[in-house]
Amino acid sequence: MRRIIIFNTILFFFISINLFAQDGLGDEKAGFSVSIGGEASASFVGYIDDFSKGADYTRLGEIFTGKLNFSAETRIAKAVVNLNLSTTVLPINIDEAYVQGFFGKFDITAGMRKIIWGKADNMGPLDVINPLDSTQIFTEMSDKISLLDIKIARPLVSTVFRFGDFSKLEAVFVPNFKPHHIAQAGEKWADSRINTLAEMPPVEITLPFLGPFTIPIKVNLEEPDTRAISYAQAGLRFTTTVGSADIGAQYYYGRLHEPAIEDWNFDIYYNTSGILPLPEGVLATASYKYNPFHQIGIDYAQDLRGFNTRMELAANITEDLSGDDGTVYNPSIAWSVGFDRELFWGINLNLQVNESIRLLQSKLGEDINLLPDRIKNDPLGVSNYIHEYDIEGGQPITTTRITAALTKKFIRDELELRAAVAWGIEDMDCAILPALIWTKDDIRLALSGGFFLGNSKGQLGQHKDSNFIKISFKYKF
């Protein structure tokens, strides 16, 4: 049904363009223009761990993907529909679709859109409007710098008011909420910190007069309905140029895109078919929640003696101002500093440091990894027990990541050799992403890979089983 709706939308788009053109709106005098473009891409992503298990366990991904981009524009309005094409169950889905109106110094946009806030190259602390598809971060990052493709478009209304030569004020309203897309436990790219409880191992408990029992833990995590207006978000952003420096300031009220967990409830259920009821398992239920927060941030960019420098600073204020609510993320300070610069022999360095600092930590509750021990040590007290834990329990106060990319071009800039490294300071882990890219006019061929090292419990090292090699062939039109 959704496929038919999308097809009819595209058909209506083309018919409307044709009628406007027949009425004379497509000529230069009327100021009407239409553009159609896109890309076709074939890619193979193979996971080294799967190769070692044999051909029966090896998958090479979706192989074909594509994009179709349509736009129609006059002097006072613009309409854009960008589609993603794939070979999955839903072969056509909307990437972006929006309408813009231009009224002198004032613009308004409404529809499904991706918006970039801040000046960092990627994943800066001020870029808070669109959630990310975390299952594609590293496979996309392996052969490109921009992560726009992994952003998830959101329905929104935005306005821009321009004044002076270099200043503008932007406002945005998002009527509902969508979190990051995070892989489930057992899937590729699953986040172990978020999915720990879904992978709870069986526990052995000992009951009086009955002895030891090994019982499984069944976990049921419920998602809230985030389509309600109570999940609406809004923000303001001001940018200007002072001399050679670009500066910006913003305020945003929204929801953190990573979930917290609340209302843990544990019940032992018994097998009553025998003479005595015997414990058969533990049912653990809880609810995801997405914490509201206020963000105040500033950013700055300037070319300083050949260093194309970018900086961001954000204060994220949550509802846990006492630092003792384990179901709410603590307030934090987040910053990013980066630059790119030509070094020597035509080598370019792009370096970025991101850090988040947790504040007001007056109570650090139990790590969620300790829940199975709690059940094991207190089996009779498990029934209807609401466990007190901290979603940030066991995590360091600071989270720091350094990302660096070296690139060198050869053969009239057609061949590019790139090596990117992301290093987690506290976790002592890293991701290495090498790539060899050949570009000729509108054709692009890339060989890349991703390799994860270090602490297997770190944010990067946990993906050791997802080391991959990727080959992609793309044509833009």
Image (tube, rainbow, N blue to C red):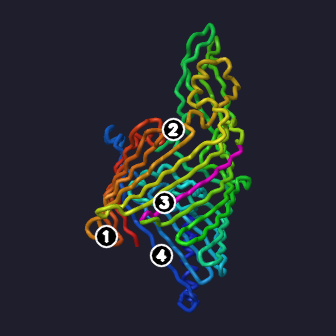
Say what amino acid the circle numbered 4 marks: Ile
Closest to the camera, between mark 2 and mark 3, is 3
- 448 falls in the magenta region: no
**Considering depth in this image, is 198 or 307 the residue closer to the camera?**
307
Q: Residue furthest front?
A: 305
Say what amino acid the circle numbered 1 marks: Lys
The CA distance from mark 4 to mark 2 is: 42 Å
Residue at which label 4 appears: 36
Q: Position of residue 12 (x, y in %)?
A: 58, 75
| Comes first in the chain, label 4 or label 2 | 4
The CA distance from mark 2 to mark 3 is: 26 Å
| Comes first in the chain, label 2 or label 3 | 3
Pointers 2 and 3 in contact (C-beta within 8 Å) = no
Q: Quadrant of residue 4?
A: bottom right
Residue at which label 3 appears: 121
| Comes first in the chain, label 4 or label 1 | 4
Q: Quadrant of residue 105?
A: bottom right
Q: Which mark is residue 440?
A: 1
